[in-house]
Image (spheres, rainbow, N blue to C red):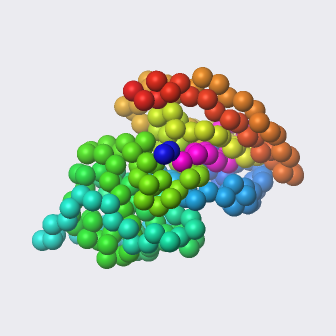
Amino acid sequence: MKPYVICLMHSSLDGRTHPSRWRPKGAGTDWFEKVHDELGGDAWVIGRVTGSEFAKGKPYLETSNEKLPRQNWFARRDAETYGVVLDAQGKIGWGRSDIGGDPIVVVLTESVPDSHLVGLRGEGVSYIFAGKSEIDLALALDILARELGVKRLLVEGGGVANGAFLRAGLIDEFNLILSPAIDGARGAPFVFDSSDSDSDHRAPLTAMTLESVRELGGGVLLLRYLIDNDAQAASR
């Protein structure tokens, strides 16, 4: 069964997500973790680029004499919250097994080398397989629900990862922390984005309902939207 999926992001008025670029500076940038905790997910998920920002290690060895089956492997199953990272080709060397106390679970494809699996196991980093060479997000969610009991998942970027969940028709709710600031220049990531290959792939959204608007102070708003997806389009 698919978890209930909430996308949570914090952006400027022009939809950019790097607060260091915003003007005026420091406009409500301390709200993300507070809202994250309020939403109370069993797990949260980020993409490879964002995940790399948390890594402390170097990439693992490129070759290994050990052969490992392409089966899900869990260092822990008893955590209250898991940090899930999409890393299709196994690029991140972690140097840690948790982020902020939440055990890391890496979503891989079967194309990753055995040496990367050896490295993950050596650092106590759990991993699951969801696809041959590209990540099947629906399959990843199903595994997280079945294997780890995840019922409520927070999707928290970056923009390409958010966009992939959106185009797959998997997001049920969108919470946007909107700060009274503007980026106004090229080069910063957006709340939702895509790779070049997905640039013409539209999300199967049929409706977005504004459920609530909450003033957080200092001109910062929390917008909560419920999302309806075309189930048939999302399954294709």
User: Which residue corresponds to the image point at 25% horizontal and 70% vertical from the top-left?
Assistant: 118
Magenta residues span: 3-15
Please indicate, yes or no, whether residue 233 appears anywhere in the rendered image. Answer: yes
- Is 166 above or below relative to 236? below
Say which residue appears at 73% left-offset and 58% top-offset. 38
- In the displayed structure, would residue 225 be above or below residue 71? above
User: Is residue 4 one of those drawn in magenta?
Assistant: yes
Q: Is residue 150 above or below residue 11?
A: below
Apparent side of residue 208 relative to residue 57 in the rendered image (left or right):
right
State which quarter of the image contains the C terminus. top left
Seen as rendered, the residue at the extreme left is 65
Q: Which residue is at the front of the view, 120 or 231? A: 231
Does residue 143 sit above or below 101 in this rendering?
A: above
For the point 34% across and 49% down, the residue is: 130
x and y, in percent, of residue 152 in the image: 59, 52
Query: Depth check: 17 or 72 in front?
Result: 72
User: What secondary structure prevails in the magenta region?
Assistant: strand
Can residue 53 be seen?
Answer: no
> Is 59 or 85 nearer to us in this picture?
85
Q: Position of residue 194 (x, y in %)?
A: 46, 36
Tell me if 149 is positioned left or right of 197 in this view.
right
